Image (cartoon, rainbow, N blue to C red):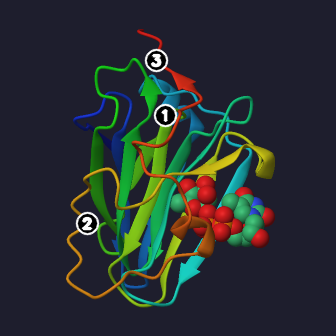
Amino acid sequence: MLDIHKTALPGVLVLTPRRFGDDRGFFSETWNKERMAEAGITLDFVQDNHSISATVGTVRGLHFQSPPHAQDKLVRCGRGALLDVAVDIRRGSPTYGHWVAEELSFENGKQLLVPAGFLHGFMTRMPDTEIVYKCTDYYAPECDGAVRWDSCGIEWGFDGNAPVLSEKDMAAPTLAEFSSPFTYEAS
Ligand SMILES: Cc1cn([C@H]2C[C@H](O)[C@@H](COP(=O)(O)OP(=O)(O)O[C@H]3O[C@@H](C)C(=O)[C@@H](O)[C@H]3O)O2)c(=O)[nH]c1=O
């Protein structure tokens, strides 16, 4: 029912829910709390987000919310395709600054689980790409933070000119300038 794969970063997971295809199209459970709990993942989502980006090469990120409003996010692509990225920013983590990227698309139905303590961002691969994600805490603008999209060594695979960015994301500090509010706790 639900395919779960580990990535190079512990806690960052790729989930692929089953699709039931028929003459009409397909049906898929995109989130099932019980199935996730069976897989050892307990998350209490409280907010769903949906955005659309018109232009190929739009970057949103790299974003986080600091404690006490840190968010785990379960991300999927509703239309089009995007490269979704998570970067470990837990001070003292053996993988601090490391990143993983996964292509999420309407076609592949994949989801990326980005835990609190990681930056999240994405670059769109198709026009009018929609992203949909669940969050474990509410939007808290006073805890909102960002790191420059091009300061973490991420291979975005973009051969266009300049990406489309918000003013906030353009003005974000680099990873080197950034002081993370997260600390690594060994499990
Ligand atoms: C994130 C967010 C924004 N907003 C508002 C604030 C602002 O006026 C408008 C656009 O906000 P932003 O420019 O921050 O939107 P955006 O750049 O899409 O921000 C998002 O990027 C991705 C990568 C994430 O991981 C998200 O957590 C979030 O940070 O929407 C909310 O009302 N609730 C929210 O949860």
- Which of 91 and 5 lies nearest the eye of the viewer? 91
- Please, is residue 171 above or below residue 24 in the view? above
Residue beneath label 3, please?
184
Secondary structure, mark 3, is loop
Task: Give the amino acid type for the residue marked by disc 2 in the picture.
Answer: Trp
Badge 2 density bin: few <14, some 14–19, many ≥20, Cα 10 Å: some
Which tag is nearer the camera, tag 1 or tag 2? 2
**Disc nearer the start of the sequence (3/2):** 2
Residue beneath label 2, please?
156
Residue beneath label 1, please?
36
Q: Can residue 2 be seen in the rendering of this structure?
A: no
**Residues at marks 3 and 2 touching, judged by CB atoms closer than 8 Å:** no
Alpha-carbon distance for marks 3 and 2?
A: 26 Å
Q: Can residue 64 be seen in the rendering of this structure?
A: yes
Alpha-carbon distance for marks 1 and 2?
A: 30 Å
Q: Residue at x 37, y 65 (%)?
A: 20
